[in-house]
Image: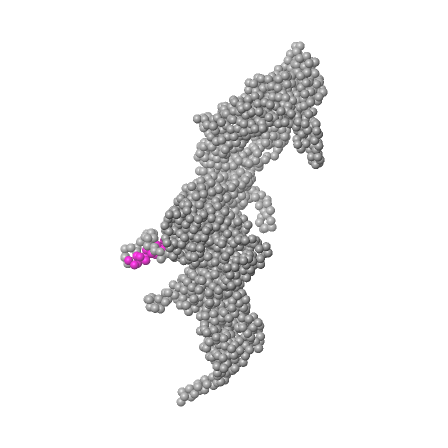
Amino acid sequence: MRISPIWPAILCLLLWLPTVSLEAADGFILRAATIHTGVRVIEDGAIVVRDGKVVEAGRWEDLAPSLATSDLPLIHWPDAYVTPGWVAASSNLVAPHPSPESIHADFRAADGYDRYGDHRRLLETGVTTAHLSPGEHRLLSGQGAVVKLVGAADQRILRVSADLSLSLTDAVDGARPLLKIPFPASSDVAITAPTPQRPRSRIGRLLALSEALERSNQDPAIHGGLAEAWSSGLPVRVAASKASEILAAISFLRGKDRDGYIVGGTEIGQVAAAVAAAGIPLVLRIQPVGGDVGFTDREPVEGLTDWPQLGTDTLLALAPPKDDLRQLRWALVQAAPHMERPDDAIALVTQHPARILGVEDRVGSLEAGADADLVIWNEGPWKVTAHPLEVIADGAVAWQPQTEPTTVIRAETIWLSPENRIDGGEVLIEQGKIAAVGRRVPHPPHSRVIDAGSGSFLVPGFIDSYGHLGLRGDSGSSGTGDRLYRLIGASDEPEHRVARSGVTSQLLTPMRLQRGAATAVVVKTSGRTRSQRVSQPVSVLLLEASGHPDEALGGISRLMDQGKKYLESWKKYEKSLAEWEKKKAAGEKIEQKEDEDEEEVVEEEGPDPLTGIWELTISGGPIPEAETAKISIKLDGLEFEGRVVDPIPPFPVRVVGTLDGTTIEATIEIEGDVLPGVPKINAELEGEDSLVGTISLLQFSVDVVGTRTSKEAKSFKVERRKKRDEDGRPNAPRINLALEPVRKVLEGQIPVVVTPTGLEVAAKVIDFFSEKKIPLTLRLGQEMRLYRDLLAEKSVSVILPAESSFTIQRQSFAPGNFLSRSGINVAFQSQASDGARSLQQQAMQAVERGMSADAALHALTGGAAQALGAADRVGAIESGLDADLLIWHGHPLEAGSRLQRVFIDGEEVPR
Amino acid sequence: MSRVSGSKEPMLPKRMLPKMMLTPRPMVSLVAALVLLFSAQVVPAGESKLALTGGTVMTVSGESIADGVVLIEDGIITAVGTAETEIPYDAMEVDCTGMILAPGFVDPHSSDGLDIPNENLPSAPFVDVFDALDPSRFFFEDSLRNGVTSIHVMQGNNCVVGGVSRIVHPIGLTPHEMSRQAGVALKLSTTPRRGYGRMRQLAELREVFEEYDRWRENLAESRYEQEADKEDDDDTDALPPEESRSQGQELIRDEDLDDQHRHLAHLIDGRLGAWIYCGSATDVAPALALVAERDWKDRAVLVLAGDAHLAIEEIKEAGIDVVLDSDLIHRKRDALTGDVEETFIPDVYRRAGVRFAIQPSRSGAMPERFIGYQAARLVRSGMAPAAALRIVTLGAAEICGIDDRYGSIEVGKIGNIVMWTGDPLDLNSWVQKVFVEGILAYDLEKDARLERLFPEEPEPVEAPAPLDDEGTSEEGEGAKPAEGTPEKTAGEASSEDGEPLEEKSSEKGEAPADKPADPPKESSAAGGE
Amino acid sequence: MRTCTWILLALFIVTSASDLFAAAEVHAYRVGKVVTMDGDDRVINNAIVIVTDGKITAVGRSRDVEVPPGATVIEKPQLWLVPGMVECHNHTGGSSPDLHDYIYLTNPGLRTLEAIVPDGVEMERARAGGVTTVLTIPGSGNNMSGFGTILKTAGTGSVEEAVLKAPGSLKIAQAGNPERYFYGVGRSFMNFNTRQTLRKAMEYHKAMTAWEQGELAEEPPKDLHWEEFRALFRRETVASVHTQIYQVLMTTVKMVAGEFGIRTVLDHSTFDAWKVARLVNEDQSIYTINGPRQLHFDRTQRRIMGNAARWWQGGVRQLGINTDSPVVPQEELFYQASMACYYGWTPYEALKGVTRIPAEALMMDHRLGSITVGLDADFCLWTGDPIDPRSSCEMTIIDGHVTYDANGKRVF
């Protein structure tokens, strides 16, 4: 029952998106460096979430065995600090009600809450639950509520009536008498005198409350049904700031024998003992630091100076300055230094407020049974630079940063070069590149912080200077016109193994060279698409020189001459184009020379290379097994259009694109928005009736191979080319794929890597290229012994042979030590088809043979990059280079050191 | 009657040119004005028999009938059928050939016909829109022109309890003449009125009903005591207050209700509907809670605006009808990215299967003023044309609870029928004639305000005297904008009136009807009088 | 004998007193023209009006009327004698701070009688302008701001002497100003409230009437709020309704006059109110007193319309003019009438509209408003037609006394 092979495959690409998987599954397992459940701290902990609830929390090693068979996806944040979603014990989310009564129990803060409000701006500060207050501007202003800031509208309100909200602060004084306008407004209706409101004085506040309670016993309707609200046993929330107010609050709560808590507490320091003795919970509103106090007679507020010692039995929670939830973390930052351990402060914004507000069964902890509201922080939230990386509410992602992910790696040693290292430094990675290196680097918001810990040693990723990983058993020969990089798709298991060994780049070379020449490409060992893995399609020109020294260079020389002519045709074109543009910009008329106006006919009559039925096989990437489909394509000029004909897709699928030479660029158009983007096809015709390429969608790509099973006889017209367009603009010369790499070499863009065999050939090669000032790298065997001075003089890089030593004339001779001591740049090569996992071992053997560890490390990294002409991209920890980094514990080339983590283009290679 | 028979003339093409040339212009406008303002007295209801023949009858309730006949007697439709339908000998026949007959639109919720609606008194369950109806409002005239024949007039979006509504016809000199059903529904609002927060709004709303409950308990108690006194039975009078209250509930009579609580009592005993305004999604839950608590499910309607459609699940579950705001597109800006997302609100309800009605816009010169345009937008968003027409006729009538009399062309319903030149949802169609209870209430040919829109002749080159130029160009008042929609006045309080009587007499002398020579000059001279 | 002596003494006193004042009691005004405004609409040229004891005792052509012996003859052969004008809507008969009491939306218990100042500057200006009677009513800031008082503008004597009828009318303002009440009110609440107030008053009236007719065993408690309304519901007095635009005037006609059967005077009745003419004509007891705004600019039609003329064209014949003094100064009542004529009304009807019509509207036509035998001698001598702005009032006679004489001290 397979409907269509391609489209389900492309759809299944989506399942790779981590967020989608998180929401699609009914739960997940989260593993993180530290998990603070609100009650305890778990290092390398894990929590299991199912159906929006926490099922289990504990150490990863304890849970791992039982989770091995779990169907839930595992999310691993190896550096993150996870806390429960924060609970703000006080907030300004709801404006104080405007009604004038000074005692009225029926104003419900829950009514003022917008159940559909989008609070992601607050979620990004880590707060997921908040208390709503009807206001602290009245003696009794109504009923508070507890709500979540996210979730389904009917689920957001945790407690409609959480408390009765009292206030003993100065804000309640001077309530104006209540004038009831006669109603109906006819003069037979008596005008009653304005009802005096309380309190009239500070000392009258408690009395007024008691009086109101007394009166409400007689008349249940007065004060907004105070009698019922009071008898329902709601906790009493008392706003009290000054010492006298706090004492009054204690007295009131004790006198009425009510459960309740105090909020505010500016002067708590003076009466901490009394509060602690009474055991009344306190929501401490942290004051803003400094600030312009203006010309009022208020005393300036100096933040949190005096930490109240309330003892362990009294619940203490934090409220942000001015109840502004965005500042709750700031309050925590201030409170943390007063704690025994900074971790202890987290309870003040999670477990304690949840208990004070009576919602501890739902929020404020990550123990089994609690709502899966959690915040993944980049580091301990009490640190100034801490930020959430993700906020999850009820098991679903509630907030994710909009910014590009950035990473900061903190290591004990950052190895920059043999001469230079930083002790205790940081590296900032942005968009896969190293953005900053130093002792302290900027921490952009929401950046991941990876603290590599003590003994950590950060080095650039290793580079294999000559390997065959990625050929996939293709042992055929390859020429300069072939483009090796087209073999590259998403990295696979062999690449992953190599990457995990610390080799982040490899010069991919063909097994055999066609007529002594081929191209090679520097490939990253990890990446989801070809474009991620290959930044320069042709990285070096590979050459072989062998035979008699006088003839060995014949082929190379001819190739160079052809390349030179080709280059000149381009130079000529560029020159005339520049002239044309200059003239055009100056508005001059461009005269058409008669001779140039003639057509340069490159018409080829031949079979239409594309029209017909193609059978495509798609594999690689996330597709579990290869799929095939048939597409009927019709070429018209340079544009073609095709349709999937077998198997018939559920909805019409068109392929529209262009053919330029042999390059096919196309997009797949599918009716209906079933895909998150437009899949793109990049393919190349390979001889008759076959093509190779990729289909990419978002960051995914799959390989596609096609053969034509039938063709329609349709003539293929190549347009007649003129040297100039009708407006006189010169036309570019035809691209000669075989000579393109040579052109790049001649322009100095890429180096040549030459493998000389035979006596004296190497010297000829060195002369030939140094004369042309072409950067040269040689692969030499033991004959290098003869050319040390020449190599040093001409600054030729050498790719070391696999052997760590040769014995010549009974003398042992180690190539690495031999060359590097003369200042010659060297690099290691694996020549392996299944990857360069032994590269580090080669380097260690070189060290064993006398090479300095730092020099060997340089040969693995910067030296290799230089040899391959890739030093502008890889091989060093330098701002602007690719973030290919290895975290070692100890120097990589010392015994006992361990490679801990590998980053390629800023992304960690998973274990 | 004579006017009705006069329209047997052959029908004019779509962009009709009224045959007004033979009549001097001021006469025409006088008659038109009289028709507009005093039509209720022109042909008294109850004596007319009217047969509309030859047109396509869009019954809404059933199939459309090509070349159909609609018979209206005493304001009630007595027959709907094909051309074979028998027409009584004494019925006046109106030839509708080439026209479309559709039921008049039903405006489900409007406060436009009011002179200072009550938006100030927060809790006013006792008021009635009757006392604020202003028959001279241009709105009523414009309603006819746009094919609206029944209006549910309701006030109080900006209240806690906004008073009781009624069904009104857009013709008549006084509210008595216009009103067709008093006491349709009581308006409540869970959206904070100006100056209120949600807390205060909902606290006051609760207080209204709690106060009513207390009042009713006391009333019940005193009623019980009254009856007990009357019976003079020693056994009964010693009941505790709770029991006397519950027993007294049965004894409360209509005359015991006072003015301030009568409408609330009617709402609670089922005589009034509960229409609750929710200006945003978060206001829906309290409204639904109130409906559930008081068991109003079968008579509650939500009047929705803003982002209320976000609460679609709750609304759907509650199974309550809704009336949508005139602004049918909701734009939401993402809090983080700033991207704006647009929602065509009726789509949300249509997909959810919630029955809804739509309103025309209340102001401005936008096409949303036409309820037909609003319905046309439903078609554009994928609704079948017949279903869209039903939304603004029978659908709205059902939601207002007046579908037994309004909303379709069916035997037994009130003869509110609009004769269109084309499909009612096509903005190129014009209302040719409007019959309200079988009375010709509007006639495009006599619509003085549209004269300049369809000029009979080229206008004179010289600009006429300023007073004559009734604002064809400048300002908004009475001006006819260029885009071809009739009369987009800014809804000024001013009303229509007749041409002065003395001008009528003087015109008779000066410009006799049989002198058609040089009409442009004549009209300018007449206007400058 | 002693009795006899007393009787003689009394006779002497009486006769001598009557002799003493006889000369002052009878006045004969010989004038060029008398516009009587009586039921026959008589205009008498070269006429004599005899005033005896403040009452008109004879009216006629000079040759037909015999001047009683001893009568003071005032010869003004060039002047017109016109009934003193009656102002239906005046706020200057009392002290100005007492115009309003804003406590309630309906204040039925209030009376301007409490605030009357019989002789003020405004009264002097009134009589200098030919206005001899005014109905001083409270303002229109509330839906019902109390009862008005009808008083002469003579400016002599006590309040009791000046007051002609109290309460003279009930002031109702259905809209236009009361919207500014505390919480701000719309039409529906104002009308609800007014209706409720009137209904309570009516219930009180019905209860009292029932008791008076012996249908109730016990006398209902007296309630000063509603006591004054009894005359209103007996149609012995009227309601002055501040009412302007279509919607409000329509409500007045349907509610005050229709629902409650109150004799209604439509004060102002400006803007587009004349469109309600058909309704007004249905109740012949309604008087329409137009002003002070005499023109209406119809913004949809872009045309100027005379209010009074429109009412007249609508068939309303009980049509008068007011000033709303001090909005328009009281002495300009005639000028308001002139303006009504400027905008299309006819002068004679306009003159009637400031004399007999308001007198009838206030149910005072048995005392005022025309030069008819038996009525109060309230009239003015004008240099010409009072509606003509070139004419001036030369002399004002109230209750037979000359209260203004331009020859002595000219005010205007």
Position of residue A746 measured from the top left corner of the image (x, y, whole percent): 68, 23
If the image is split into quadrants, where does the C terminus of chain C sit? bottom right
Q: Nearer the viewer, residue A265 or B371?
A: B371
Task: Give the residue displayed 55% in from the left and 71% down from the top.
Answer: C388
Position of residue A446 measured from the top left corner of the image (x, y, whole percent): 56, 35
Occupied quadrant, residue A741: top right
Asked if one can make out residue A290 in the rendered structure from this viewpoint, the answer is yes
Q: Is residue A39 magenta?
A: no
**Is residue C145 shown above or below C18?**
above
Task: Give the residue displayed 54% in from the left and 25% down from the top.
Answer: A611
Position of residue A826 measured from the top left corner of the image (x, y, whole percent): 65, 20
Q: Nearer the viewer, residue B453 or A733?
A: B453
The secondary structure making up most of the magenta span is helix
If the image is split into quadrants, where does the N terminus of chain C sit? bottom left
Query: Looking at this rendering, what residue extends furthest in the bottom direction?
Result: C1
Q: Which stretch appears magenta?
A: B214-231
- Left or right of residue B320, residue A413 in this image: right
**Is residue B214 shown above or below C283?**
above
**Is residue B49 shown above or below A77?**
below
**Is residue A311 shown above or below A434?**
below
Position of residue A605 measured from the top left corner of the image (x, y, whole percent): 60, 23
Asked if one can make out residue B276 in the rendered structure from this viewpoint, the answer is no
What's the image's color scheme?
A: one colour
- Left or right of residue B320, residue A608 in this image: right
Q: Nearer the viewer, residue A292 or B287?
A: B287
- Give the mark count: 0
Q: Is residue B227 magenta?
A: yes
